[in-house]
Image (spheres, rainbow, N blue to C red):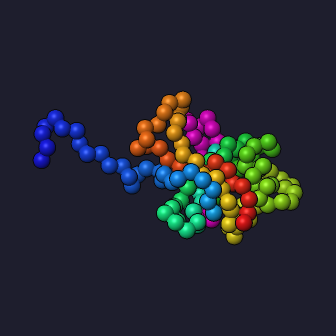
Amino acid sequence: MGSKNALPDISADNDLPPLVKPGIYELAFVDYKTARMFRGKAEKLIMNFRIITFGEYFETELSRYYNVKQIIGKPQRFGCFKPSQKGAFLREYMTLFTGRVNRLDRIPMSYFEKAIINGRVETVTRAQGRNIPTELQYSVITELRRVK
């Protein structure tokens, strides 16, 4: 047992979001949810994907975060939302799945279920204008590029 004033060993590996090497990966859709973040000031769509590129990060789950214009109903898994006409979600969606969307509040998310998508993964190194310690940095999907 250590001395009374020794700092405890802190291990948060299982609680932290994953950290993978930045790059382009093949992704398979897992699910999505709607959420209100930052004390309810930001309505978000959070899409979860699994890396299916064979290698060190195979089966690692990562998220892609989008701002949305409105959450319809309560925030939840597979919740309803309305994206902005000029936002990243609608632009990426239309790049991946060509065609016309008639109503922004009824976009078919089922197209993601069978698609293998190339996505860009980057490391989050700053939050709220401050650097994140290396041990707490994590990866997110920053762009869904194309359907393979």
Name the main secondary structure of what is drawn in magenta.
strand
Nearer-the-camera pick, 90 or 107 = 90
Look at the image and say whether residue 102 sits in the magenta stretch. no
Instruction: Please give the range of residues in magenta.
Output: 27-43
- Give left or right: position of 78 versus 18: right
In this rendering, position of residue 96 left or right of residue 17: right
Measuring from the top left, give residue 79's x and y in whole percent.
Answer: 65, 55
Please report the residue visible at 78 percent of the width from the left and 49 percent of the height from the top. 91
Residue 7: x and y, percent? 22, 38
Task: Work out whether residue 65 or residue 41 is closer to the camera in this orientation and state it.
Answer: 65
Going 54% across and 46% down the picture, which residue do you hit? 123
Q: Is residue 38 above or below residue 76?
A: above
- Report the residue at 62% width, 62% height from top: 27
Q: Is residue 80 visible?
A: no
Query: Is residue 131 at least partly visible in the picture?
Result: yes
70 lies above or below 29:
above
How far across and how far down the image is residue 9, in percent? 26, 45
Residue 32: name its quadrant. Answer: bottom right
In the foreground, 38 or 125: 125
